[in-house]
Amino acid sequence: MRKAIAAVVLIGATLLMQQTALAGAEEDRLAFVKYYKTRFPDIPFAEYANGIYAIDSDARGQWLEIEEFPPYEFAIEKGQERWETVFANGKTLADCFPQALQEIRVSYPRLDERLGEVVTLEMAINQCRAANQQPPLTYGDDEIIDITAFLAFQGRGKKLDVRVPENDPRALDAYESGKRFYYTKRGQLNLACADCHVTSVGQLVRADRLSASLGHTTHFPVYRSKFGGMISLHKRFAGCVRDVRAKPFALQSTEFRNLEYFLSYMGNGLDVNGPGARK
Amino acid sequence: MASNIKIKAKISGDIADVKSLMLHPMETGARKDPETEELVPIHHITQLTFANNDKTVMVANFSTAVSKNPFFGFKFRGAKAGDTLRVSWVDNLGGTDEIETVLK
Amino acid sequence: MRVFVNLMLMATVLVAQSGCSTGLERRFAEVERMRVMAAEAGAEWLQTEELIKQAKTEATRGDMERSNSLLELAQFQAETAIKQAQHEADAWSGRVVQ
């Protein structure tokens, strides 16, 4: 009898913990949104999809001019070509994705039930290629970024809706792992993502203003004037880690995928508006 | 071959506001290939020309100061709907590209 | 007698040399071990690996002073990264936006 009661209590406690952790994820997000609302009372929620342009009016003016002739248009066109390229076995990338074209971008990142880890859009593209006996594309190279640029463009207007399934402790682990990464100080400069993008949001780092993390992932991949080319979200992560003088993690590493998972969840409800154009 | 120039033009009164974006590596000759460590040869657009109904309205002489995939915008007077605007460039290796659009 | 002294001298030199190079190897191995510890904690700093590599190059070239100062810098980076990771294991949660 006592064993039975103990078992029930244990199961109940575990369920409660999972629920609490999930409630934790949504609580985290609401606290996140509230923080920026308090910090910038005049900026509507939807504007955060525009990143730094939501809080820097001078940069916004320049950005609107660039958007008249977006530098990422070439990437979208090349991406579409790749999306429609037929493999040797007669299939295309589209055959791997059951969703409508516009829905593909917002379907990621997600916790893959079979693998038990976070799968991003880039990973899904290479999974598709592998399933069709095609060599993988190198993460961070133009070929794969062009495809994500095309899919981001097709997905414009759909809202980020990252799920952290209640009944999957692996999802909660990944979320917590990404959250921990976000708030952990690292590198010689001893800075956490939060130090710049939460605590010091809107302030200047040399000639750049620090953007809010709310909505950080909506507009990737991004054309960077600095490189005269496109970069992916994980390339940006690697750059930031390098900037605080820590050794960057590999593109599509577990650390970066979990960080993407956490950051994307924080941006739930915001419109996808990629590809973007930045300095 | 399809053109790698994009062009947009808006007429207001008799002034046309023209914006163009063109694909070109615009190598200065001072950049090293990250893998071979050798200098990438100089390769850039030398002249960009806009002609409205075959009459030249803008000539731009580019050099190494213009960066990759140049964006170029300008305004000119004397435009009207139905005019054919042609933009073309030539680079230091003899490469060329051009595109035409009808002003609306 | 002279042969004996020469042999003793040679033995001393050999022992001294082997002790020196083993000590240096041990030092490099120790710093590398710390770098790996920092890496496993997800906290490795940007320059540590490169500093160790440069220290090795300088040692091979015979500039022991420079090699040593580079190795000390690498050690500092690795040690501090480990301390940072240990501290952050508890400190990170205090930064979460409430």
Image: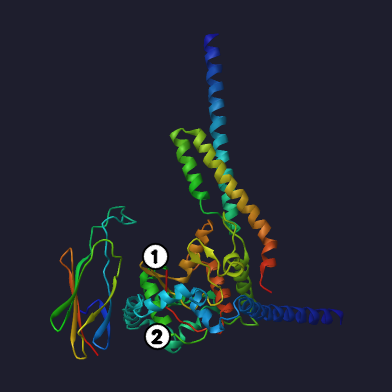
As helix, strand or loop, the secondary structure at mark 2 comes to helix
* Frontmost residue, A126 versus B55: B55
Instruction: Determine whether, in the image, residue A206 is placed left or right of residue C33.
Output: left
The picture places residue A159, in percent across and down from the top left corner, at 52, 86
Q: Specify the amino acid type for callout 1.
A: Lys
SS at mark 1 in the image: loop
Residue A271 point in image, percent of width and height = 50, 84
Q: Is residue A268 above or below residue A182?
A: below
Q: Residue under label 2, please give it.
A: A95
- Residue drawn at (17%, 63%), measured in percent from left and top? B93
**Please, what is the three-letter code of the amino acid marked with disc 2?**
Asp
Please give the residue where the numbered disc 1 appears in the rendered image: A226
Tags 2 and 1 both on a single chain: yes
Q: Is residue A95 above or below residue B41?
A: below
Indicate the quadrant containing the N terminus of chain A: top left, top right, bottom left or bottom right. Answer: bottom right
**What is the number of callouts on the image?**
2
Mark sitting earlier along the chain (2/1) = 2
Q: Is residue A117 visible?
A: no
Q: Nearer the viewer, residue A100 or B85?
A: B85
> Between A14 and A263, which is closer to the camera in this rendering?
A263
Q: Which mark is residue B93?
A: none
Q: Is residue B27 visible?
A: yes
* Percent coordinates x, y for residue B88 in the rendering: 18, 75
In the image: residue C92, left or right of residue A47:
right
Structural crowding at the residue carrying mark 2, measured as other residues with C-alpha within 10 Å and reported as few (<14), some (14–19) or many (≥20): few
